[in-house]
Each structure stands twice: as C-alpha cells, then as structure tokens.
C-alpha cells in the first residue's frame, strides 16, 4: 500500500520530467533523421516525414560527406587539437594544483589568487593580441597555436578545480607517505593522483568537451588545412541555399564522440561534480 | 635501532606561539618513552619535529649519532603511527604495509616475507587483500602499526594511536603495543594525553606542560614522587586531592591541619624528608591520593590521630572500589598548575574550582574497599595513611621530598 502511494506521489514528477526530456531531445532527433535524408527531400518537406516514411532514409549523405574530403581532415584536426590540449591541461594543472595545495613556498597564496583571478578574463580580449603574437612567432594557422591557446585558457579553471579537491585529501596521508620514504613526486603520483581520480577524470571530460565543441578559437587561429570540424561545418553554411545534407551528418558526427566520452565516464562525471561539496 | 636525543628543542610558530620550549630529553636505544600532557601542551609538535614534519626553530634532534635537523622525513628512517591511522584508502592492507618497501625498491620476495611476518605478529594474515574502508577501527590500527613494523626503522613515533578506539579495544591494543615493542626492541616515542596509557606503556614518562618539560621518570617514581603540583595532579586517577594545610610540631612528630582535621605525620616520614621541618608553622599544600584513604571501620587498628570524619556527598561504586566524594573545609589549591589541569578537564571544571575557592572549600575523593558501608549523604570515618602524604611548597609548587 505504501509503495502504491509512493508511486502515485511520484508519478506527476516522473511524467513532467519525461516530457521535458522529450522536448529537449527533439532537435537532436531531428538532426539525426535529417542526416539520413537527401537534399531534395529536406528541401521539400520537414524532417518528421522521415519518421513517417522510413523508406526515404538513406546513408547517402554520410558516404558523400566522408568521400568528399574535407570532413576527414577536419575530424583529424579536431582530434589533434582536443587530445593534446586535454592531456597537457590535466597534467600541468594537477601538478600545479598539488603544489598550490600542499607545498609551502614563498608567494604561493598570491600566485594562487592570480590564477583564480584569471578565471574571469574572457577569451575574447585575448584573441587579437595573441593572433598578432602568433603571426610574429609563426604559430598562426597551425594546430600547436590552437592547442596552446586552449591550454592557456583552460588552466586557471583546471588548477582551481583540482587544487580545491586535493586540499580535501587529509594531510596525514601525505605525511604518512613522506614518512614512508616518498619524495614529493612520489607523494603526488602514488597518493594524490589515485585519490584525486574522480576530480581529474571529470576535469578531463570537461576540458575535452569544451575544446571538441569550440568554434571561436579555431575560427580565429586555424586556417583551412588545420581547421577542426566545427569550422568545417560552419563553412558549409550558405547564404541563399541550405545544404543540410552536408551539415546534418557532419554535425551528428561532431556530436557522437562527446556522447561516447560522456557515457563512458558518466560515473566519474557525477562524482567529480560533487567533488569537494561533501567531504 | 638507535637512541634519540633532543637538545634544547624549541618550536615557535609564525604567530609567536611557543609550542615547545627548550626540551632536553635522552631516549635510550630500545626504550619506550611516553610524552604526556594536557591537550595543546606541545607534545605532538615535539614528536613531529623528531619526525621531520615540523621545522625545528632551534635546538638539535639526534637519531643515533646523526644530527637530523636538516633531513627530510624520508631520510630519517623513523616510522610514524598517526592518530587517525592515515592508511592509504586506495591500497589493500598488503600494499599499505608494503608501500615504504616498494618505494625503497626492495626485492619482491623480501617485501612479501616482511609483510607476512608483520601481519602474523598483528594477526592480520586473513585481511591482506582488504581495503581500509572494509576494516574495523581496531584492524585499521593494526595495519597502521604493521606499516611501521615492516620498515624495521630506527625508531617508532606514535601520535596518540589509540585515542580513536573505544575503551575496551584501547585496553587490548595497549597491551598489544607494549608486547610488540618489547618483542621488537625498537626505540619508541609515544605521545598521549591519557595518563593511564602513559603509566602502563612507558619505560619512562615525560610530563610536559605548556611546552615545558616537568619531569621525566619511571611510572612508579612519577606516582610516588611527583616533582610539582602539576605532575601530582596529572598522574593518577582519580586525581590527587589537594588542599592548603598547616604544618606544626606535635609531640616529636609533625601535625598537618586542614579544614578542622588534624593528622599526625610520624617522625619517620619527616626523617626521610628533612626539608619538611623548615615548613613547620607555615602553610603547605597537602596532597592525599584517593587510594591512600580507607573506610576506618575496615581498618581496626587505625590510630585515632590519622582519622577524619566526613559527610559523603557523592558515592560512585565501580565494583572493585567505591569512590566517595566529600567536602573539606579547607580552601582549594588554585595555582597556575591546578588551573591548567582543570582546563584540560573542561572549562566547567575550572569554574567549579573557582567557586569552591571563593567559599573556602574543596572536594576530596577517597577510593575505598567495596566492603565499605558508606552511604550517600551519610557520615563516615576515614583513615588516611600519612606516611604516603605529599607536601608541596605553596609558593613554588614544588614537591617536598628531601
């Protein structure tokens, strides 16, 4: 009886949540369906017709996209930008965060304050000066330049997040490791890294998603040969005609990798978001 | 294994607090030394300076012949057992214990042998694959000990290792630590605020107050001849009763008077402590341990001049003994030492004492044989063993034993 009442009590909430979820999913489903329709069909009828008439669906847009060149290069560029950025940010930030949390040195707190201060600097203010600088040192238009910019603007938040997590690790544990004969680096990778895994993993996911989905930075600093998928897709926009048969499959490919990453690491993601809130 | 020597060890924190002040202490090879004192007295800070976890403001720490002041913890070759165990939560019991050996890149077979051996000593054989979160408090404590044992270090440093255990387990682990230490013969410094632990474990006990060493001696010596009021009040449970009293000559012996009671102190006692004579006619602080009083009806031949009548204000039956509280019309002793001890018990306790001081009263506790017929609210006659009285100089707080 009590169970029945509980289910009835919860039913309205569940129904509302399901409706909200469905509404949120509509554009994605629309994109997915559109990506399997030819240009002619998309131009004459709405995507929902694809659901009503599954026979209209074809993988032609995908094969055209992948054989047409451009997209594959863009995909490769996205990976070449995103993976190194994520690795560098995670590595540098976790070392820096460890130092900020657990090593005493002169000026530490001031330095950390500056790092936190950098959190509020919008990337837009840096675009033009950095572009000029890149032009002088020959980084402009190359992937390392894009990576470097992402790293620079990813670090403050990354350091902030990890430092706040690391500081929650009991000091006794680090002292125990030092007593056991560990040097600072060993304390870091044998104690702090394993204990900080939830935070590090969620940082890695965040960072990966941001860079993967970035358009602005790539638009400014990359050229055609080094442009990632976001730029490639944007370049398919036409003023007077919609070549949706290219944009839809490309956008869906763009989405798929983050989705896989998210679902694979979902467990850490939730843990990491809670990191530091409940000790 | 090695001796440990502290010479003029001092710790001043950046805010100017002096945590440890000019601590001189020699710990012999294989000795079990206990540092004891109220919370915040600097004992843990002293231990951490030996460990290398706290910078030394001035003074010297020697482990064996080496001065280790400038060495980092990992180079001092001492093992520490932390109050909250500080086990690595992501490692199994085996790996927790093997951690230091792995860092040293010890041979795999050797690591296995040493961990197995330590596990055997501690009864952890069955738990080696478990993670710390799946262990009980007592088991965690054992793992923490095991981590120290496998290293075969120069010395063990233990920082209140039993304070997180419940009372029964604490008694059991106390015996265990004592057994293991004497079995291994490793020099040990053990920090605690529990005087019972200090007394039962230590070969010698160092009593510290506000960063200053008060007395270092064997447990029995501390109990029999506390150097001052602080040590007297700290060692022993229930604590020593103290009241202001007057010494006077009496028929060849001495007489100590307080709150309307006159007790004879035999000349034989005075012969052992000739300095007492110089206090004749003056005030002293009289200390009587609860154990040195007994229900007079249970001691048939008790001399009349060692008896005192009392009204029982509270009675605590502990089974093996009965604690009787009674009021004495003598002002409570309220020196700096006594206040320090009272604060350790709780702010409320200090207030109580101050109240008693204002009305010129003090509350005594006597530990009686359970056969006593004492009743709460009833009257009782007690006999006090004046050969075991303690006397302190009220001006300096020092014990009078010479």
Image (tube, coloured by chain):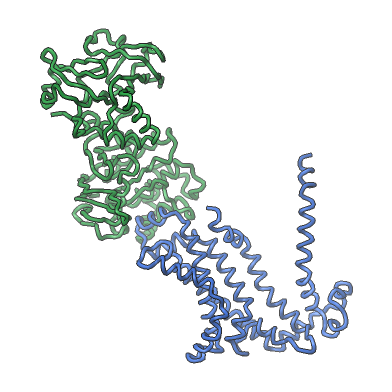
Chain colours: A blue, B green
Q: Where is residue A26 in the image (x, y as percent from the top left)?
A: 79, 69
In the image, residue A178 above or below residue B219: below
Quadrant of the image occupied by residue B322: top left
Q: Which residue is drawn at 30% across and 51% down?
A: B17
Q: How far across and how far down the image is residue A122, in percent?
A: 56, 76
Compared with residue B180, is residue B168 higher up or lower down, i.e. above or below?
Answer: above
Closest to the observer: A203 or B285? B285
Q: How many marks?
A: 0
Relative placement, left or right, of A173 versus A230 is left
Q: Position of residue B399 (x, y in %)?
A: 19, 31
Name the residue at 63% across, 65% down: A264
Instruction: Look at the image and tell me in which quarter the N terminus of chain A lies.
Output: top right
Please give left or right for residue B176 compared with residue B393 in the image. Answer: right
State the residue at coordinates (55%, 56%): A277
Q: Is residue B3 visible?
A: no
Left or right of residue B85, residue B226 in this image: left
Residue A147 in the image, given as x and y percentages of width and height: 54, 80
Left-right relation of A215 to B83: right
Task: Residue at 19%, 26% (x, y): give it.
Answer: B284
Q: From where the camera sits, is residue B113 visible? A: yes
The image quarter in which residue B66 lies:
bottom left
User: In the depicted view, which residue is nearer to us: B328 or B137?
Assistant: B328
Residue sitting farthest toward the front: B358
Name above or below for residue A247 compared with residue B205. below
For this rendering, which residue is in front, B112 or B154?
Answer: B154
Relative to B245, residue A173 above or below: below
């Amino acid at each position: 009886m009590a169970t029945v009442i509980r289910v009835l009590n919860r039913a309205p909430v569940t129904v509302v949540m399901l409706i909200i979820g469905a509404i949120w999913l509509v554009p994605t489903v629309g994109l997915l369906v559109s990506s399997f329709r030819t240009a002619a069909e998309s131009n004459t009828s709405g995507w929902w017709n694809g659901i009503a008439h599954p026979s209209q669906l074809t993988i032609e847009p995908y094969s055209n996209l992948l054989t047409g060149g451009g997209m594959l290069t863009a995909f490769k560029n996205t990976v070449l930008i995103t993976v190194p950025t994520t690795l560098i940010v995670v590595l540098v930030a976790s070392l820096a965060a460890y130092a900020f949390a657990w090593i005493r040195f002169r000026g530490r707190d001031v330095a950390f304050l500056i790092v936190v201060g950098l959190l509020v600097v919008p990337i837009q203010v840096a675009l033009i000066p950095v572009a000029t600088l890149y032009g002088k040192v020959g980084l402009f238009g190359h992937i390392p330049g894009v990576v470097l910019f992402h790293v620079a603007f990813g670090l403050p938040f990354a350091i902030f997040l990890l430092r706040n997590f690391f500081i929650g690790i009991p000091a006794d544990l680090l002292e125990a490791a030092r007593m056991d004969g560990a040097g600072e680096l060993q304390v870091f990778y044998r104690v702090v890294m394993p204990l900080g895994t939830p935070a590090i993993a969620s940082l890695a996911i965040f960072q990966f998603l941001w860079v993967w989905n970035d358009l602005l930075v790539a638009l400014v600093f990359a050229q055609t040969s080094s442009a990632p998928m976001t730029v490639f897709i944007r370049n398919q926009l036409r003023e007077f005609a919609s070549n949706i048969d290219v944009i839809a499959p490309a956008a869906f490919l763009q989405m798929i990798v983050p989705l896989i990453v998210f679902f694979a690491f979902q467990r850490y993601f939730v843990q990491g978001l809670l990191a530091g809130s409940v000790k | 294994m090695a001796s440990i020597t502290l010479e003029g060890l001092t710790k001043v924190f950046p805010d100017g607090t002096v945590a440890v002040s000019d601590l001189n202490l020699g710990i012999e090879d294989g000795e079990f030394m206990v540092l004891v004192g109220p919370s915040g007295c600097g004992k843990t800070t002293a231990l951490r300076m030996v460990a290398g976890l706290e910078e030394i403001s001035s003074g010297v720490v020697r482990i064996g012949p080496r001065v280790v002041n400038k060495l980092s913890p990992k180079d001092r070759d001492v093992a520490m057992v932390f109050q909250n165990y500080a086990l690595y939560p992501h490692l199994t019991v085996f790996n927790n214990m093997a951690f230091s050996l792995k860092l040293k890149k010890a041979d795999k077979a050797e690591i296995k042998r040493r961990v197995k051996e330590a596990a055997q000593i501690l009864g952890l054989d069955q738990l080696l694959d478990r993670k710390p979160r799946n262990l009980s408090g007592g088991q965690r404590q054992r793992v923490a000990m095991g981590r120290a044992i496998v290293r075969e270090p120069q010395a063990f440093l233990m920082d209140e290792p039993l304070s997180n255990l419940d009372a029964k387990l604490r008694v059991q682990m106390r015996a265990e630590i004592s057994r293991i230490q004497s079995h291994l013969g490793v020099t040990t410094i053990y920090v605690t605020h529990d005087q019972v632990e200090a007394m039962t474990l230590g070969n010698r006990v160092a009593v510290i107050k506000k960063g200053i060493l008060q007395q270092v001696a064997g447990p029995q010596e501390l109990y029999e001849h506390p150097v001052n009021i602080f040590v007297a009040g700290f060692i022993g449970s229930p604590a020593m009763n103290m009241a202001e009293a007057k010494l006077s000559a009496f028929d060849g012996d001495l007489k100590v008077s307080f709150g309307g009671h006159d007790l004879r102190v035999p000349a034989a006692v005075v012969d052992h402590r000739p300095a007492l004579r110089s206090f004749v006619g003056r005030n002293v602080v009289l200390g009587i341990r609860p154990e040195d009083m007994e229900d007079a009806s249970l001691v048939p031949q008790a001399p009349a001049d060692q008896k005192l009548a009392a009204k029982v204000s509270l009675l605590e039956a502990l089974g093996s003994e009965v604690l009787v509280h009674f009021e004495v019309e003598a002002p409570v002793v309220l020196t700096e030492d006594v206040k320090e001890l009272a604060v350790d018990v709780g702010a409320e306790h200090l207030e109580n004492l101050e109240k008693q001081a204002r009305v010129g009263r003090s509350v005594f506790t006597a530990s009686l044989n359970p056969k006593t017929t004492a009743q709460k609210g009833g009257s009782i006659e007690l006999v006090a063993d004046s050969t075991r009285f303690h006397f302190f100089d009220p001006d300096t707080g020092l014990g009078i034993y010479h």
